Each structure stands twice: as C-alpha cells, then as structure tokens.
Image: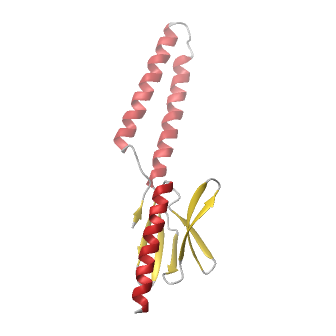
Amino acid sequence: MWLKPNRALSRRDLRRLIGVLAALALTTAVLGAWQGNVFAPLFALVESSAVAIALGVAWRAGDRSERITLDESSLEVQSLPGRRSARFQTYWVRVQLQASQGRDRLLLTSHGKELEIGAFLGEEERAELSRKLKVLLAELNQKQRK
C-alpha cells in the first residue's frame, strides 16, 4: 500500500496560482504608488516572495509518503522521502487508533515498539486504513494457523 497526502494542485497549477497572486499584489501596489504610496511596490515584492516561498514549502510537504508491505512473516513500513523503515512480525503487531490531542493517531505496536502511520491522512482515511490493516492481518494470521 502507498499512503500519500491529498494534493489539490499540480506543480504547474501551483506556479500559476503564485503568478496570479503576485500579479494581483503588484497591480494593487502600482495603483497605490500612483496615488502616492511609493513604498507599495517594494512591499508587494516582499509579500509576493514570502507567499511564494510559503506555498512552495507547503506543497513540498505533500511529497512525503509511506509504503506498507505486508507478507506472511512481516509488516514493513518505509517512510519516503528518507530512509526510515520499521518492520513488525505479522503475528504480534497490533493496530490501534488512539485519541491524542484532539485527533486519532494510527499506531502499530509490537514488542514495546510503537510507530505512528498515516499522520498526514484525514480522520476517516486513518479509520479506514486501520480497518483494512486489521482485516489483512487477521487473514494472514488465520492462514498461518492452518
């Protein structure tokens, strides 16, 4: 399974949005300068740059994802980008939805290890993922018993 945050904009759409916002700010600043506020264009450039940087940082945060691999012996979670990886034995791993600070956290626990997954997902998506993982793990454990 690949877990990825929802993105409303593509890279191209993000550039268009930033361009439109910058054009609106600069147009307003030019009108302000025409009426006597000579510093308005300078502030518009600073503001447009700050907004572009903030939107870019927020958009890049959407690049993170988690890959969950499940087989008969192990459940592995790999966080991307980066190299963080955790492996649990399928028989011992437990899936829990735990209320914490006004939101539910989806935790995998086993042998004293705890890993939060899907932190970037919405509440309903985390609940659905929890149900799906519990069903898959139960099916695997039943196969192993036979």
Q: Is residue 16 above or below residue 82?
A: above
Expressed as whole percent of the image width and height from the top left, the position of residue 122 reads 49, 54
Residue 138 is drawn in which quadrant? Answer: bottom left
Residue at 42 percent of width and 51 percent of height? 6
Residue 20 at least partly seen: yes
Front-lying residue, 93 or 50: 93
Q: Is residue 143 left or right of residue 102?
A: left
Residue at 56 percent of width and 23 percent of height? 43
Q: Furthest residue to the bottom?
A: 146
Expressed as whole percent of the image width and height from the top left, the position of residue 24 reads 43, 22
Q: Is residue 125 above or below residue 83?
A: above
Q: Is residue 3 above or below residue 146?
A: above
Residue at 55 percent of width and 12 percent of height? 38
Expressed as whole percent of the image width and height from the top left, the position of residue 12 reads 34, 41
Residue 125 is drawn in which quadrant? Answer: bottom left
What quarter of the picture does the N terminus occupy? bottom left
Residue at 46 percent of width and 68 percent of height? 131
Q: Is residue 16 left or right of residue 60?
A: left
Q: Is residue 102 left or right of residue 123?
A: right
